[in-house]
Image (tube, coloured by chain):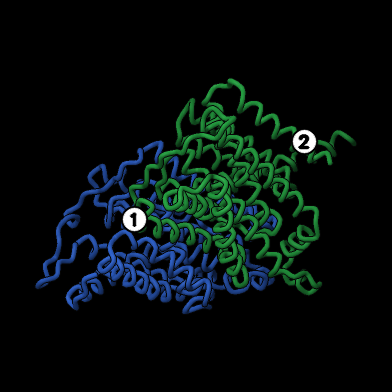
Chain colours: A blue, B green
């Protein structure tokens, strides 16, 4: 292990960029699991699906970010359908929290992953754009442009979702469902329709997150497995459903992972998210900024 | 009594097949299917009876396999010792995971078990002695007397372990332990209030389930003559353990046997005829279909059919 303050500074800069990226890929889960209590273990798989969809759309010469934005409505509909199906098969019967709801999403994650393998093969796929491959030279530091792009998109995404949830009528309705569903029912509102809408938004956001994923690094179908750790780590550490908390805990994970990457090597990096997740679950399951 | 006669008959049959002239491929395939029965049965003790979803079978399976490798490389320990040590380490890991149930339930517990899998994998990737990320080639010791080949012997070992785990699951289900676990599955608070020692029972279920999975993993390196982290800690073990239990039916010890036999054989056939990817896909699709359409599994369907025909 070689330690120097230069390396530490580089690790910190990279960690902040990576952290915002992690916050962005987790924010969909922060809505679907954090606010709606859906045990959505298939979230990373849906995101990787978004990466492959971006790959296909970008094949027509469209910028990957634009492709991600174009895919958002499609994924919104997909999300509505997934939630509807989940509601009819589990929540309605009152079996969602148990073994079967979890097994359902776990099965869905596998189906998506293997489906991608069957269509695209196990090779890594990547997209091309002007900002992929080149770096910004800042004195002695080199910051890849793709990380800066992901950083920018992540900030915009997190900020707009936070504003949406706290300022608009529907956004507040979503928070109300999370807070007290029976009360909402008593007041004559239909919680299922609100949750359906919210799950649609969470899935739509995953399309853009998937686009960022394929910009930041090449993707392969089994990539969702390691992102189970990263996304759930961020959401649980944040405290369920807190959007600013998601950004903060994304940063914590990003910096921790980048430091481990820099000083201990790449082979230890995947364990950081899972280790942090286990520690948080063991010591403070309600997270840092819990509701 | 009937159960023990059936178990003895099954074991004698397995032994007879192993000593007969059946094609070698049969043993390779049957070993995998029988291991799947052990895994599903073990998973069901915690997942089915107590309702705690464990996504971590690869962690237990893998700790068993790596314990066996270490013992073999270090002391050239015999297979029986490897299995015993694998079970002990699996039980130990089960105890650790069991402590998590103090604070975590539902999806939180499930996600924590996924974390255990990846942490174990990372540890093994970084441990040179057992081959790191590239893995380790193992030279099998000479096979023991009545068996002609190593695969035949492992087949009998796997049959024995499947019987043993089913016997344990059956005992747990029928005893006060099983009743306690079912009580805490339905409501942990109510069970605790009625004097069920919930923590003790959960720890027992985790340790037993973990030890059986560890034992199931121990012969795997000898079976493959090779070990490597990525395939050992693969989440597809989770989906077959989970799938076997849920598709068969989680409420009875027969369920995981039926489910795992069916899934395992189907997977073997598909791997040979179509491809290795499709076999995992099939398990995923069947799992989702059963969870949605027949939540009680094949046993539930069978019960419903019995009721309908008796009316």
Classify mark 1: residues with Cα within 10 Å, few (<14), some (14-19) or many (20+): few
Q: Secondary structure at mark 2?
A: helix
Distance in Å between CA atoms under marks 1 and 2: 45 Å
- Front residue of A36 and B131: B131
Which residue is depicted at the point 50% across and 39% down? B281
The residue wearing badge 1 is B128
The answer to whether A265 appears left or right of A287 in the picture is left
Tell whether B294 sits left or right of A9.
right
Q: Residue at x 71, y 65 (%)?
A: B201
Q: Residue furthest left?
A: A139
Q: Secondary structure at mark 1?
A: helix
Image point (29%, 68%), residue name = A258
Looking at the image, residue A47 sits to the left or right of residue B78; the answer is left
Observer able to see residue B266: no
Mark carried by residue B6: 2
Q: Earlier in the sequence, mark 1 or mark 2?
A: 2
Q: Quadrant of the N terminus of chain B?
A: top right
Q: Position of residue B112 (x, y in %)?
A: 52, 64
Q: Is residue B243 visible?
A: yes
**Residue B266: which disc?**
none
Q: Position of residue A107 (x, y in %)?
A: 54, 47
Q: Quadrant of the C terminus of chain B?
A: top right
Camera-nearest residue between A263 and A33: A263
Residue A212 place in picture, x, y as percent: 31, 57
- On the image, which quarter does residue B301 sit in? top right
């Amino acid at each position: 292990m070689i330690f120097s303050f230069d390396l530490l500074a580089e690790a910190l800069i990279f960690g902040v960029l990576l952290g915002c990226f992690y916050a962005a890929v987790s924010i969909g889960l922060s809505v679907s699991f954090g606010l709606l209590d859906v045990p959505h273990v298939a979230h990373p798989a849906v995101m990787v699906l978004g990466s492959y969809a971006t790959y296909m759309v970008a094949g027509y010469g469209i910028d990957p970010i634009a492709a991600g934005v174009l895919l958002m409505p499609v994924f919104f509909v997909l999300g509505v359908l997934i939630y509807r199906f989940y509601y009819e098969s589990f929540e309605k019967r009152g079996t969602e929290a148990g073994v079967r709801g979890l097994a359902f999403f776990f099965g869905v994650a596998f189906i998506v992953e293997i489906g991608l393998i069957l269509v695209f093969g196990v090779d890594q796929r990547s997209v091309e754009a002007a900002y992929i491959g080149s770096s910004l030279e800042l004195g002695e530091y080199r910051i890849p442009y793709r990380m800066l792009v992901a950083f920018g998109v992540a900030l915009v995404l997190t900020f707009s979702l936070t504003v949406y949830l706290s300022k608009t009528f529907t956004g507040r309705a979503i928070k109300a469902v999370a807070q007290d569903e029976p009360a909402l029912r008593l007041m004559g509102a239909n919680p299922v329709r609100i949750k359906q809408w919210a799950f649609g938004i969470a899935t739509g956001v995953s399309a853009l997150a998937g686009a960022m994923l394929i910009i930041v690094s090449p993707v392969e179908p089994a990539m969702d497995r390691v992102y189970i750790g990263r996304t759930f780590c961020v959401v649980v550490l944040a405290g369920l459903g807190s959007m600013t908390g998601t950004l903060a805990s994304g940063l914590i994970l990003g910096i921790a992972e980048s430091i481990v990457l820099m000083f201990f090597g790449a082979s230890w990096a995947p364990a950081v998210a899972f280790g942090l997740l286990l520690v948080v679950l063991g010591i403070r399951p309600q997270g840092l900024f819990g509701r | 009594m009937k159960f023990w006669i059936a178990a003895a008959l099954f074991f004698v049959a397995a032994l007879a097949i192993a000593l007969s002239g059946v094609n070698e491929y049969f043993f390779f395939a049957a070993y995998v299917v029988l291991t799947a029965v052990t895994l599903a049965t073990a998973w069901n003790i915690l997942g089915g009876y107590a309702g705690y979803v464990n996504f971590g079978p690869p962690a237990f399976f893998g700790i068993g396999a790596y314990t066996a490798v270490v013992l073999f490389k270090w002391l050239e320990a015999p297979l029986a010792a490897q299995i015993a040590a694998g079970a002990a380490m699996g039980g130990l890991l089960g105890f650790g995971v069991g402590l998590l149930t103090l604070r975590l339930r539902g999806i939180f517990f499930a996600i924590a078990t996924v974390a255990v899998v990846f942490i174990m994998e990372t540890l093994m990737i970084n441990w040179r002695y057992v081959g790191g990320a590239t893995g380790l080639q193992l030279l099998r010791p000479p096979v023991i007397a009545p068996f002609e080949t190593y695969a035949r012997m492992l087949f009998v070992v796997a049959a024995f372990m499947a019987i043993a785990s089913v016997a344990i699951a059956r005992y747990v289900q029928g005893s006060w332990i099983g009743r306690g676990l079912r009580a805490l599955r339905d409501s942990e608070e109510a069970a605790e209030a009625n004097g069920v020692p919930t923590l003790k029972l959960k720890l027992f279920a985790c340790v037993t389930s973990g030890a059986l999975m560890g034992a199931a993993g121990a012969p795997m390196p000898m079976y493959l003559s090779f070990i490597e982290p990525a395939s050992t800690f693969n989440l597809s073990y989770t989906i077959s353990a989970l799938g076997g239990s849920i598709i068969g039916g989680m409420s009875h010890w027969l369920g995981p046997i039926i489910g795992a036999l069916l899934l395992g054989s189907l997977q073997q056939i598909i791997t040979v005829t179509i491809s290795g990817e499709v076999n995992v896909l099939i398990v995923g699709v069947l799992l989702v279909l059963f969870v949605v359409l027949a939540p009680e599994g094949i046993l539930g369907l069978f019960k419903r059919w019995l009721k309908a025909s008796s009316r």
